[in-house]
Structure formats: C-alpha cells, structure tokens
C-alpha cells in the first residue's frame, strides 16, 4: 500500500509499488502514451501532449483543475520523470520506474508523487476528489492499470442492476474515467 | 425481473429490479434455473458484514442458461447450460495462472479498498458485499456473469439441476477441504460441522481414500444425514461431555489423521476491528462456535493435518498454538479455488460417484426467500439446504 510522508517545504510524497505481469517495455509504452491515462486514472479527465509538455485536466467539484507538466527524464522501458510548470498546482513532481521482476513475474512499477496539500476552497475540492486520500487513489489507479494490462479490461459493477439503491462509499466512483467501460457496452439484456 | 435483496439486518425482500445487462465485453447473462442459499449467506443475513448495502442482490450458488454474451466472449455460447462458480476470477493474473482462483487479484473493482482493510486485495464474489466487488448475486431470475470464459462450466442438458447446482460452491468446497487433508488410503478424518459443506467433505474424503469419517454436530437431522448418506460415525456435541476424548476412543486412542473445521467463525468477510468487536459480542451469544477449531487441533494426531474450509474473517482468541506446535500439525485453509475442481467433480457426479442432492431439504420459488432465510438461520423445520427455482419447472 502507498506510503505518504511529509517532506520539507510543505511537500508530501506518496510512494507505492505494484507488480504487473507483462513485459517491461509494454508496461512502459502503455503508460508513456499520456493521452491514454484517463482510462486508468479515475479523476483525470484528459491529458494532451505537446512535445515535452503535457496539459492535465482533472475533475473537481465546482469545475475542472488544470495544470501543465514537463517531462524531465524519459528512458524507454525504465523511467519517466515529470514536474509541474507554474506555482498553483497541487501535483509537484512525479516518477514512475519500471524494473524487471524476478521469477517471471513481469514488471515492478514504482511510483513516487510529490504534492503540495492545498488550503482554502481549492483544498476542500481536492480533498473531495481524492476522497480516500492520495495514497489510496494512486493505488486504485495502479490497480486499474494492472487490470487493463493483464486482462484487457477494468473490472466494474458500474451500471449493474440492484434493488432499492443507495449510493455509498463502497460503490465504485462514477467519474468520467469510467466512460470507456460504458462505451464498450453492447447493450441488450435478456428479453 | 425478481431478485432476492438484502434490505438490512435479517430483512430479506424480493423486489422487481431491472434485468441485468452486458456491461463489459467479456460478460454473459445467465437465466437462473436453480439457486441455493448458502450457510455463508446467513452471515450477511445476520449483519456481520458492514460492506453490505440495502438493495444488494444476494446469492452465489446458481446455475442456468446463457441468454446473452458480450462481444469478447469466445468459448461460451447462447443456449449453453452452465454452473457458475461462486468466486469471480479473471483467469489471467498470477494466481489464476496457478489455479489459485480464489486469490484472483484483478476481479474485484474494490480491490484496493479491500486491501486497505484486509491487507490483501480480496477476489470478487457474487452477491457478497462491496468488499468482494459488490457484484449482484444469483438469487434472481437473471444474473450478469463477468469473465464469462473463465468461470461458467458447461454441463449436459439431460442431468437434473439438483445433481449439478452444488458444483458452484459446497461440493468443491468440501472436496478441497478433503484434498487439503493429504489423505492416505485407510485414513481417519474427523469433521466438525455436518452442514452441507461438512457432508460434502465427508463424501469427498471417502472418495479420496479415507476409511473412517467422524462427523461432529448438534443438529439431529444433519447427524442423521452424515450417518445414513455419508457412512460416518457421528457425535452430538450437545450430548457429549468431551468430544476430543470420544474421538480418541473411536480411533484406538490415536486421534484422526486429519481434521476438518467446516464451521468457521460466524463473522464473515472483513478484517475491521469494529466488526471484530461485534463478532465477539455475537459469539458470546453463540458460545459453541469458536470451539470447533480448538477441538479439532486438540483431537488431531501428531503430525496430522488441520483443514479449514469454515470461514474465518478476523482474529481468534485462545488458539491452542502450543498444542499445534508440539504435535507438528500442518494447517491448510482458504476460500475454495472452485474453478479448479468443477470439471473433476462434474465427472464424479456423471459417473455416479457422488450425488450431492440429498442435502436439499426445501424447494421454493424466489417469493419464499424471506421465510426460507429465517428457517435456514433458525435451523427450523429440518432446514439443511434451500434451493430456489426462479422459473417454475
């Protein structure tokens, strides 16, 4: 599970790891396609790439949050590092590292994200977005990534039938990130 | 369609809900022909699982006919008659590749939340709370079956449901419990709990070479089934001063080679300390339950094996670890790798080696679910196993 520690200068750092049973280059390549990341990252609405820069749009209550990021290191199959551009952003920097897993277990993925917990109205919004805390959110996103890499789909119960429903914390979050699942519906229940 | 829904503590309702639809391309929709209430459903009924929500559709033992498939389903076809395993497995992850299907790490959409509570990501289960994925269950007219090429076992059309339904859970669960005993020909096995799983374990143990089976319970009709249908010696613990001594007497003073705890703890499905406290509270009201594992450890011969199909969810007190260590016991346990055993057991059923249908005591339609849960919970009316048929035959 993710580890969340306070660093100097008001920055916190979350680190976590997951093993994905696919070759290192394949896992790297899927992640490096930044515009495809919203499929896995529940609250990320879109990522657009222009050269070394990327523009991130994240769903938040009361409107989207946006920022630019810049890739600072990119070693194919091994590591991607980035940092945010400008001051107002929550996510400051990040690193995703890919290493060979022993015993044919595929690829070990190590993620580190430095973030600045915001205060004020924005902070409340971010806290809502990251409901369970950034550590659990990153773990959830990586679990979704692993599901897609290993099975070709992201398991979901979103949209299933139920009795007198009530939404709750155990229900999967209904975000735009789930839309690709919805698109793959071919409809037609039993007649 | 009609579906059996959890509506709160000991509150079961049969509701009309929308029919399930294909959500992912690897899904199938099954029209249910038979579905059973499992002993573990009673843990939900009794409110031991805080991740149950009102409106959740119950049920994880079911079979029926495939009426729709997603675009990526390759093996299963519309019209196939299938038995569906109670656990949902992706078929691709490290554990599925090794046939450890119940440890599937990718089938539970809430895997990370469950890991935050349990320490590991629990696999998905039908109708067994949001901790295990929140998948709608099979006590309904129709059910959505994810990973349709991985779980459902296609079965012949000319064999009655009663012979096949229990391939979904209790028969593989009893069989794996017996296999975990590492039985040698002529072995003696003692089984705590003569409910459906204990009885399936008794039959399976004999199939795997055991010669003497001892069943321990307090419900007369269950002991009668153990004796008449499973050729077991029986001990009614309510009428026996010292179960461990009685077992030793029956085994020439040696103790059984293997012991099976088919009782488990009443609490099922979480590791929350809050739940643990509630569990302890409840266990004070049902004082005999936690004794099964302790007795089993005490009865087993040195060097023997303790097999645990009964469900444990949290922490147990007063485990006789010194006895277990001193005797050098081997412990094997866990949720059933159902998929691994279904085909083998289907063949045994078709050859007539095992007929699990004798455990059925009640047959009803879905409308009778609330009363049936209560009767099964209270062990009233000789209730050992309830089978519901959504569609009248």
Image: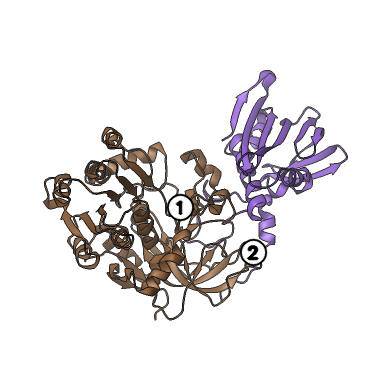
Could you say where residue B203 lies in the image, as x and y percent from the top left? Answer: 30, 63
Chain painted purple: A
Q: Residue at x 32, y 71 (%)?
A: B357
Q: Is residue B360 left or right of residue B35?
A: left
Compared with A152, B16 (above or below) is below
Q: Quarter of the image containing the N terminus of chain A?
A: top right
Specify the chain shown as brown.
Answer: B
Residue B241 location (% of width, % of height):
11, 46
Name the residue beneath numbered marker 1.
B129
Query: Residue lying farthest right?
Result: A51
Q: Quadrant of residue A25?
A: top right
The answer to whether residue B326 of the structure is visible from this angle is yes
Please state which of the two labelled residues, at mark 2 or mark 1, is closer to the viewer. Answer: 2
Chain of the residue under label 2: B
Residue highlighted by disc 2: B25
Report crowding for label 1: few under 14, some 14 to 19, many 20 or more residues within 10 A (C-alpha). many
Residue B57 visible here: no
Q: Are marks 2 and 1 in contact (CB under 8 Å)?
A: no
Label 1, secondary structure: give it. Answer: loop
Is residue B92 or residue B56 the one in the foreground? Answer: B92
Question: In the rendering, at what x and y percent does residue B155 appear?
Answer: 47, 73
Q: Residue at x 33, y 64 (%)?
A: B370
Q: CA distance from mark 2 to mark 1?
A: 23 Å
Quadrant where the C terminus of chain A lies?
Answer: bottom right
Q: Measured along the vertical axis of the image, is residue A138 above or below residue B352?
A: above
How dense is the environment of label 2, judged by Cα within 10 Å: few (below 14), some, or many (20 and up)?
Answer: many
């Amino acid at each position: 599970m993710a580890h969340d520690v306070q660093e100097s200068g008001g920055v916190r750092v979350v680190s976590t790891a997951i093993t994905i049973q696919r070759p290192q280059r394949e896992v790297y390549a899927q992640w490096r396609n930044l515009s495809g990341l919203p499929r896995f990252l529940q609250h990320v609405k879109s990522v657009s790439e222009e050269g070394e820069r990327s523009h991130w749009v994240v769903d938040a209550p009361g409107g989207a949050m946006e920022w630019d990021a810049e890739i600072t290191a990119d070693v194919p199959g091994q590591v991607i590092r980035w940092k945010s551009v400008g001051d107002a952003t929550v996510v400051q920097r990040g690193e995703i590292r890919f290493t060979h897993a022993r015993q044919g277990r595929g690829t070990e993925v190590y993620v580190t994200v430095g973030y600045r917990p915001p205060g004020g109205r924005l902070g409340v919004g971010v806290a809502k977005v990251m409901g369970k805390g950034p550590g659990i959110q990153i773990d959830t996103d990586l679990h979704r990534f692993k599901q897609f890499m290993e099975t070709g789909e992201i398991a979901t119960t979103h949209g299933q039938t139920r009795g007198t429903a009530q939404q709750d914390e155990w229900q999967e979050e209904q975000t735009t990130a789930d839309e690709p699942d919805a698109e793959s519906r071919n409809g037609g229940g039993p007649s | 369609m009609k579906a059996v829904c959890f509506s709160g503590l000991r509150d079961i309702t049969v509701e009309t809900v929308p029919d399930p639809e294909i959500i992912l391309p690897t899904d199938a929709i099954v029209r249910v022909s038979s579905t059973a209430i499992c002993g573990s459903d009673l843990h939900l009924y009794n409110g031991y699982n805080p991740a149950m929500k009102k409106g959740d559709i119950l049920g994880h033992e079911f079979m029926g006919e495939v009426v729709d498939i997603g675009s990526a389903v390759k093996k299963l076809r519309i019209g196939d008659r299938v038995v569906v395993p109670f656990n949902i497995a992706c078929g691709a992850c490290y554990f599925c590749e090794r046939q450890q299907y119940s440890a599937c790490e990718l089938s539970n959409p809430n895997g990370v939340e469950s890991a935050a509570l349990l320490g590991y990501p629990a696999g998905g289960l039908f109708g067994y709370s949001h901790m295990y994925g929140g998948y709608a269950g099979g006590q309904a007219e129709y059910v959505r079956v994810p990973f349709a090429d991985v779980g459902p076992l296609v079965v012949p059309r000319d064999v009655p449901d009663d012979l096949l339904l229990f391939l979904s859970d209790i028969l593989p669960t009893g069989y794996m419990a017996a296999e975990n005993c590492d039985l040698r020909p002529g072995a003696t096995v003692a089984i705590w709990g003569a409910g459906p799983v204990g009885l399936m374990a008794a039959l399976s143990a004999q199939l795997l070479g055991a010669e003497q089976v001892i069943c321990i319970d307090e419900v007369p009709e269950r002991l009668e089934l153990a004796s008449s249908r499973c050729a077991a010696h029986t001990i009614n613990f309510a009428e026996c001063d010292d179960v461990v001594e009685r077992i030793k007497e029956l085994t020439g003073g040696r103790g059984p080679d293997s012991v099976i705890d088919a009782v488990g703890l009443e609490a099922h499905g979480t590791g929350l300390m809050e739940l643990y406290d509630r569990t302890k509270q409840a266990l004070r009201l049902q004082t005999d339950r936690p004794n099964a594992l302790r007795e089993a450890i005490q009865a087993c011969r040195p060097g023997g094996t303790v097999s645990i199909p009964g469900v444990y969810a949290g922490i147990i007190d007063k485990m006789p670890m010194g006895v277990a260590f001193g005797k050098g016991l081997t412990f094997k346990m866990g949720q059933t790798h159902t998929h691994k055993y279904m085909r083998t057991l289907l063949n045994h059923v078709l050859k007539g080696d095992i007929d699990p249908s004798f455990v059925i005591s009640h047959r009803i339609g879905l409308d009778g679910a609330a009363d049936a849960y209560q009767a099964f919970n209270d062990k009233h009316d000789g209730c050992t196993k309830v089978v519901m048929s959504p569609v009248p035959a």
